Amino acid sequence: MFKMIFLIGLVVVSSAQAAEPLTDARSIVTNANLATYYAGADLRTETRMLITDAQGRTQRRQFTILRQDVVDGGEQNMLVVFSQPSDVRGTVYLVNKQPGEDDNRWLYLPGLDLVKRISVGDKRTSFVGAHSFYEDVSGRWVEADQHELIETTDSYYVLKHTPLDSDAVEFVSYTTWIDRTTFLPMKTEYLNAAGTVYRLVEALGVEQIQEYPTITHFRVSNLETGGNTEIRMRWAEYDQQLPDDLFSERSLRKPPMDWLKPARRIKQ
Amino acid sequence: MNSIPLIVRLATNRPVLIYILTAMLAVLAATQLPRIHIDTDPQNMLPETQADRVYHSAVETRFNLHDALVVGIVNETNANGIYNPQSLANLHALSQSILGMEGVVRPDVMSLATVDNISQQGPGTIRFEWMMNQAPKNAARAAEIQRAVSRLPLLNNTLVSGDGKAAVIYVPLSSKSLSYPISESLREQMDAFSGDDEFHIAGLPVAEESFGHEMFVQMGISAPLAGLVIFLLMAWFFRNLRLITVPMIVAMATVIITMGVLIGLGFTVHIMSSMIPIFLMPIAVVDSVHILSEFADRYHPGDDRREVIRRVVGHLFKPMLFTSVTSAIGFASLLLTPIPPVQVFGAFVAFGILLAFVLTIVLVPAWIVRSSEKQLANLKRLESGASASSLLARSVRKLGRFAVARPWPIIAFSLILLVVSIGGVMHIQINDNPVRWFKESHPIRISDQVLNRHFAGTYDAFLVLEHEDPDVVKALQVELSAQSALLNRYPGLKQVVDDLEVTASASDLDQIVMRLDDALFDANLDDEPQLLALMQAAERSQSALRYFQTPKGVALIEQLQGVLMDTGDVGKTSALADAIKVVNRELRSGQAADYRVPDSQPAIAQTLLQYQSSHRPDDLWHMVTPNYDSAAIWLQLRSGDNQDMSRIVDSVRLALEATPLPDTVQVNWAGKTFINVVWQDAMVSGMLRSLLGAFVVVFVMMTLLFRSLRYGLLAMIPLALTILCAYGLIGWMGKDYDMPIAVLSSLSLGLSIDFAIHFIQRFRDIQALTGDVRSTLGQMFEEPARAISRNAVVIGLGFSPLFLAPLMPYVTVATFMVLIMLLSAMATLLMLPALLRLLIRSPKPNDSGASA
């Protein structure tokens, strides 16, 4: 089943590259979701997050993400293991993403030697103090919004997305600029009730990793507070054939050290 | 005394020119008035460079603090208090509306509708969610919110009162000046809400800004009213409307020109300077009264009025100049205070007094010259007829007989009064609170009382902790420099190591950790162990510098919170330790036993990482810096009185003397309530300095004026007694010594010396003619004493419209002015004759003149 969806995705991507722009907002969004969050069968990458406040004061977080797609565009597993700062080293998040339903999330805090299940009230909470939300990291459920293609420029599809359940989110709508070739969202603007853009996500760097164009550098800005978080992914590697059992509660207390290091580094 | 100033000659020769010049000046000054800029920020009582103010601003920046309105909803009737669907719906709707308002710092608005709940959902599960994203549909949901809030110490008794009857919304503003328009627009919305909720708005910013607004209104009401009262009084004294228009024109021109110059020069109108018109109005008419009285006395129909008025002004020139200069010095002495708005006030009142003097000696003669013969005849008839037999005249005469007959009882009584007054001065309570600037019936006072009855307090102050330990960085530098060969192989790393300073913070060290991390990726395997060792060293130093993330640092915060609560004056404290304890409890059992700070730095750091995984991660930075090198303890105080704040400051100081902090930690105060204490301290010492300064200058002037040390001293006696008596009364009455009272001290000196100058000057003039003290004193209680009493009444009652103002400083000024006028007139008319009778021997009328 998931293979079929995956194939359809590929077909759509290649046809878009051919020339004729897509006109259906839904298929653009589906493509963008696949390109951004489901590239490859799995992904291993190190992430460095620099959280800067309006005064320029910074905090750094570094972690390794292991991601495995169960169903392309659907269920997904994720293991996030913190390495920096040293005080939170070994903190682990394990996520079993279930689009359209509440995700299963677990947390391990080595300092308290505590495994905890996190019940998600809302996916739009800060991810460990950053300006990016949990949802920015894991992807927003495609079905949660109504999508509208408002413009097709030479480079971008410009879409407006309106939430179906406006009580569940803090924005009124958001607009994305999706690259016509890669289907990567290069810019997203969130509008509040007053009609002003208060939140901005910008792709600052796209790299071709294996056969997948990947946003390896992006910035989330809170225009109200003047703070932002820059996120860089380093040493990303797709299709490493991550074993399924990595994404089990066992990995919380005993993170799979071998899989956390980049393959390049291990080879040295 | 015979020399007639050139300017008076000009006035009498070219009266129309004088009119035109005055009118032009007034119009020019009036064009500046619309540029008025009101400033009510008590912070501006301190110069911008004052250390505490600089620190306070730095702390506001460091912890992202803004001036905030405290908007309260109180429900006294519902059994569940505020926790009923209707009240919570109102709270929710009001919060939403506030979030949409221009000038509100949205991310920092605190309300049940904008904060997070952290709780356990089933065993082993933690949940972060909005506390009240939507208004509760039913009572059960409202009760759930109540349970949740009661578990969260950072919210309980801060957002909802302990008794559950009141809730507040903290509305931080991008600029304090917005607090008045925003509060007014909120008041309008509140009227539209249904249910039995009461709404309130409190907080220092709104009190200060509303004060500014009402002050502006009062300037427009009180000053003209004072003018009206003076006009009526003069009409009663002189019974001639045309005559009294001159002093009124002098007063108006003085006020307009002075305010025009003040505003034109770019000064802001502060609480004190808004009272300038009211101060100048009565003072400005006094000299005119003297000239008109004396002119009426000397002028006979058919005389050359130009000659008469020149003689009159020439004769009065010296005493008027001296009274004006002494009053001006009284106000100018305020320049000695370290408080800029008070300096501006003093300088411009002094300017206004001297201006009024100049205007008087040109405008009154010009007016006399331009008057018709008939009008001047009227003036003559009225003055000589009515005054000498009036009630005032008879009372004054009686007073004089008593003073001359019984000098010893008067002196004895004065001495007793002096002792009692000194006792009262010892009892003076130095205290101020901008909220108390409003009368008790004012909505701001009521809101303040209601909210502070329910809550742990709407006033805030901050106890700020700072940690600095250069030894940590020095040790790391030693370790790093031992590896210079290694560092040379990694230029990027070497660069940041070379740039490292001993004052480095945890985030400065992060540059090194980051470079080491990068280096480790590129390194050849041989370097790896050394790089790892360096990285561990850098990380250890980093952790040590993140002092308020260590168990020791957090324990220190808790310890200080304990000290603060032990003072008994603090309603509640909130700090980093509370956040850590709540998250720790919910991460573990959810039971009270786990409401504690974990015992390792990683555990604390990881607890805080969870705290940051909420909708409001930045709330943490209101309590600690991202470097964890400085932490703020929030104090909620039920009272904004400076006395209460001072007591807390003293208690903390004593507690820290008993249990000193580690050498690496410093503690300082910030917050509006604290800043008010600082400027008040500056004011008290500054006022004492300016009072003593003015006292000395006036004494020297008196000695020079009378060319006699003895008369100089005599002149100071009624004045000293007046001031001591007035302040003694304040002490015994228990009235707080606040800003207006403090400012009035030097002004009372400037005004009450006037009576003594006139009395002694006239006494000596008459004595030179009669040679006898007793008969001189008898004559003194005719026209001279009448003029003094009349001026006391004009000035005292001139301030009476201020009694009607809704603002307490205005009422205080009015009370004090009436008191001072009464006291100094009495002291002059009783003590001076008593002393003169005893000290001055009749046979040698010129003796006194020789002693200088």
Image (cartoon, grey):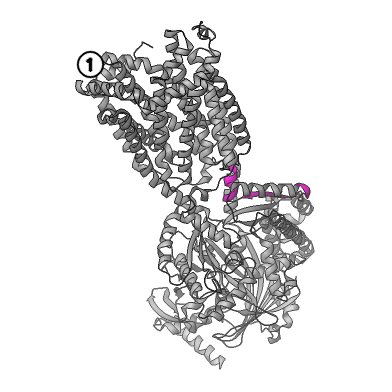
What residue appears at the point 47 percent right and 39 percent down from the top-left corner? B815
Rate crowding at label 1 as few (under 14), some (14 to 19) or many (20 or more) other CA atoms within 10 Å: few
Viewer-proximal residue, B254 or B480? Answer: B254
Q: Quadrant of residue A99?
A: bottom right
Query: Where in the figure is residue A234, as x and y percent of width and height?
Result: 63, 70
Query: Where in the figure is residue B244, as x and y percent of width and height?
Result: 29, 29
Viewer-proximal residue, B399 or A41? Answer: B399
Q: Which residues are magenta?
A: B657-678
What residue appears at the point 24 percent right and 13 percent down from the top-left corner? B303
Query: Pointer 1: what residue?
Result: B301
* Vertical position of residue B516 compared to residue A172: above or below: above
Query: Where in the figure is residue B220, as x and y percent of width and height?
Result: 36, 44
Q: Quadrant of residue B20?
A: top left
* Amino acid marked by disc 1: Pro
| Residue B670 colored in magenta in the image | yes
| Residue B587 colored in magenta in the image | no
The residue tagged with tag 1: helix, strand or loop? loop
Residue A254 appears anywhere in the view: no
* Vertical position of residue A112 compared to residue B747: above or below: below
Residue B304 appears anywhere in the view: yes
Side of B632 relative to B811 (left or right): right
Quarter holding the N terminus of chain B? top left
What residue appears at the point 42 percent right and 46 percent down from the top-left corner? B805
Q: Quadrant of residue A261?
A: bottom right
Tell me the subunit letter for badge 1.
B
Furthest toward the bottom, the residue is A1
Query: Where in the figure is residue B106, as x and y percent of width and height?
Result: 50, 63
